[in-house]
Image (cartoon, rainbow, N blue to C red):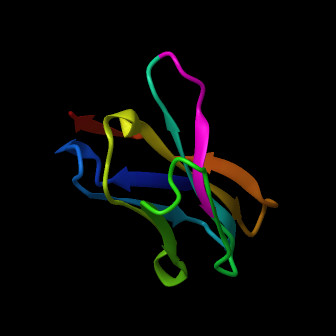
């Protein structure tokens, strides 16, 4: 089985920084796209950033210039560096990965979520 463990969330003041990480473990053969989503109270879950196996990235407009997504394929880990945080960034952040195992084709897996709270 595959599991994703997130870490790095917390409470910061506006203008501060956080670095989220999400490590995949289990019977992993390959990982394709890795991404970060967030969900604020009463809001729909939205994509924040994504990165392909080749390193191509995509960001939500709200994240451009402030957030950086990266990955370490050797560690099966994806990161989200968040700088210049704003109160509107407050949400639960979830990682999402496309994982293939020896017995199963690519399928989506979600992390447990980590809370990011930015105070004004």
Residue 108, percent across and down?
A: 69, 50
Q: Is residue 97 above or below residue 86?
A: below
Q: State the residue at coordinates (75%, 53%).
A: 107
Q: Is residue 42 above or below residue 14?
A: above
Q: Residue 94 in magenta?
A: no
Residue 91, percent across and down?
A: 40, 34
Quadrant of the drawing holding the N terminus: bottom right
Question: In this image, 105 relative to 29: left or right?
Answer: right
Q: State the residue at coordinates (49%, 44%).
A: 94
Question: In this image, 96 relative to 41: left or right?
Answer: right
Of residue 86 and residue 105, the one placed in the foreground of this image is: 86
Q: Which residues are magenta?
A: 42-50
Question: Is any part of residue 77 visible from this angle?
Answer: no
To which quarter of the image does residue 11 belong?
Answer: top left
Question: In this image, 14 relative to 43: left or right?
Answer: left
Q: Residue 49 in magenta?
A: yes
Question: Count the marks: how many?
Answer: 0
Q: State the residue at coordinates (51%, 74%).
A: 71
Question: Is any part of residue 9 visible from this angle?
Answer: yes
Of residue 28 and residue 16, the one placed in the foreground of this image is: 16
Q: State the residue at coordinates (53%, 59%).
A: 64
Residue 37, percent across and down?
A: 55, 44
Residue 102, percent across and down?
A: 74, 69
- Residue furthest out toward the top: 42
Quadrant of the drawing holding the C terminus: top left
Question: In this image, 73 relative to 31: left or right?
Answer: left
To which quarter of the image does residue 113 belong?
Answer: top left
């Amino acid at each position: 089985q595959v599991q994703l463990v997130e870490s790095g969330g917390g409470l910061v003041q506006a203008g501060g920084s956080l670095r989220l990480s999400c490590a995949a473990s289990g019977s992993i053969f390959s990982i394709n796209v890795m991404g970060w989503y967030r969900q604020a109270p009463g809001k729909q879950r939205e994509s924040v950033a994504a990165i392909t196996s080749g390193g191509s990235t995509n960001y939500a407009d709200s994240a451009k210039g402030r957030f950086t997504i990266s990955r370490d394929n050797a560690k099966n880990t994806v990161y989200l560096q968040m700088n210049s945080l704003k109160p509107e960034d407050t949400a639960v952040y979830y990682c999402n990965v496309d994982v293939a195992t020896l017995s199963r084709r690519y399928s989506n897996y979600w992390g447990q979520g980590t809370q990011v709270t930015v105070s004004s």
